[in-house]
């Protein structure tokens, strides 16, 4: 029984450590997202479009993957809205 208890405590520590790291990661990414959102608030549409074009020229592979992912998500959202059960 002691072996089981030790194993359970070890796994509990591992889970708590992983949860702590995940929380730190999410907090960091949320901070970055908030900063990006603040940057976008002060710009007009033309500036945002120009930056997107420059990014697509510098990293065409990333731009294609982002567009494909956005299209996939949008397709799922629109398709699920029309479903009748």
Image (cartoon, helix red, strand yellow):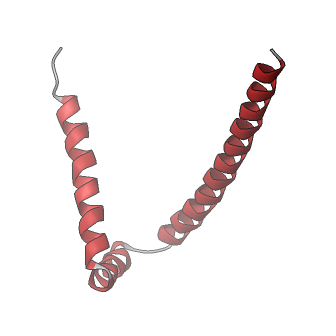
In front of the other: 50 or 3: 3
Relative horizontal placement of residue 53, taking residue 7 as reference (left or right) = left
Residue 79's image quarter?
Answer: top left
* Percent position of residue 47, x then y: 37, 80
In front of the other: 49 or 54: 54
Quarter of the image for the C terminus: give it.
top left
* Percent position of residue 5, x then y: 80, 21
Q: Is residue 72 above or below residue 54?
A: above
Q: Residue at x 23, y 68 (%)?
A: 64
Relative horizontal placement of residue 21, taking residue 37 as reference (left or right) = right
Residue 30's image quarter?
Answer: bottom right
Q: Residue at x 22, y 58 (%)?
A: 68
In front of the other: 57 or 53: 57
Q: Residue at x 77, y 34 (%)?
A: 10
Relative horizontal placement of residue 28, taking residue 79 as reference (left or right) = right
* Percent position of residue 20, x then y: 72, 45
Q: Residue at x 22, y 31 (%)?
A: 80
- What is the residue that sits farthest to the right in this orientation? 2
Quarter of the image for the N terminus: give it.
top right
Q: Is residue 16 above or below residue 58?
A: above
Q: Count the marks.
A: 0
Q: Is residue 61 above or below residue 9?
A: below
* Percent position of residue 17, x then y: 73, 44
């Amino acid at each position: 029984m002691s072996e089981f208890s030790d194993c359970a405590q070890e796994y509990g520590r591992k889970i708590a450590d992983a949860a702590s790291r995940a929380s730190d990661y999410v907090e960091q990414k949320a901070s970055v997202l908030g900063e990006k959102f603040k940057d976008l608030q002060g710009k007009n549409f033309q500036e945002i479009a120009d930056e997107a074009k420059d990014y697509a020229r510098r990293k065409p592979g990333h731009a294609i993957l982002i567009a494909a992912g956005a299209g996939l998500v949008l397709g799922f959202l629109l398709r699920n809205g029309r479903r009748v059960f």
